[in-house]
Image (tube, grey):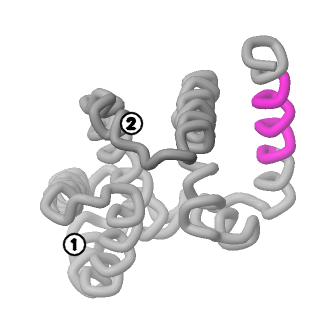
Amino acid sequence: MNEQEKKNLFLREYSNLFDYVYRYVCYRVPQREEAEDLVSETFLQAYHRLWDFDPSRGQLRQWLTGIAKNKLLMHWRRRVVSVDLDAVAEIPDGQEGETLALLDHKLIVEKLLDHVSDDMSALLAFRYVDGLSCEEIAEILGKEAAAVRKSFSRLHKKLQKVYEEHYA
């Protein structure tokens, strides 16, 4: 496929791809303006690097998902996770223990995710944030569903081991 054919495919599929990428990013970035910026950056990069797209390696949708995933990863790397201690101090009476336990669990999950590669983080987001099945994830990634299931199995074992070594 030459570059002009790639441009024609990109323009022909743009509206469907835009809706898909926008939903993909919005699930992961709750601030609308930031999500819109990331989607714009994704499409600009994709258009300027269209020569990089290889249809024999997958669909245009998969390629754009990869670009969006990288944009999201860079976005979240630039952000600093913080806990508003004033908000924690304003917990209604009788809920301190529950709220602090929930906060503790969230911090442990964040620490566990530090031990996971970016690809595995994206896999977790597909499954547990987007609610996609292994078959749907496999289609997006251009893999077999059995390979996706095996990746989840390995990932769960790794997270269990890290949890037991550091937090149990």
Q: Secondary structure at mark 1?
A: helix
- Find residue 112 and report its image quarter: top right
Q: Taken as a whole, is the magenta stretch helix, strand or loop?
A: helix
Residue at the (55%, 46%) spot, across then down: 95
- Residue 13: in sight, yes or no? yes
- Residue 113: in sight, yes or no? no
In this image, 119 relative to 36: left or right?
A: right
Q: Local crowd at mark 2 within 10 Å, few (<14), some, or many (≥20)?
A: few
Q: Mark 1 or 2 closer to N-term?
A: 1
Q: Amino acid at mark 1?
A: Lys
Q: Please determine whether, in this image, residue 56 is positioned above or below residue 80.
A: below
Return the residue at label 1. Answer: 7
Label total for image: 2
Q: Residue furthest top?
A: 165
In this image, 127 relative to 20: left or right?
A: right
Q: Quadrant of the N terminus?
A: bottom left
Return the residue at label 2. Answer: 88
Q: Secondary structure at mark 2?
A: helix
Q: Nearer the viewer, residue 15 or 49?
A: 15
Q: Please determine whether, in this image, residue 56 is positioned above or below residue 135.
A: above
* Region of the chain picked out in magenta, as a range: 151-161
Q: Position of residue 39 (x, y in %)?
A: 22, 62
Q: Position of residue 75 (x, y in %)?
A: 27, 40
Q: Residue furthest front?
A: 93
Q: Is residue 137 magenta?
A: no
Q: Position of residue 80 (x, y in %)?
A: 29, 27
Q: Position of residue 66 (x, y in %)?
A: 43, 52
Residue at the (74%, 13%) spot, across then down: 166
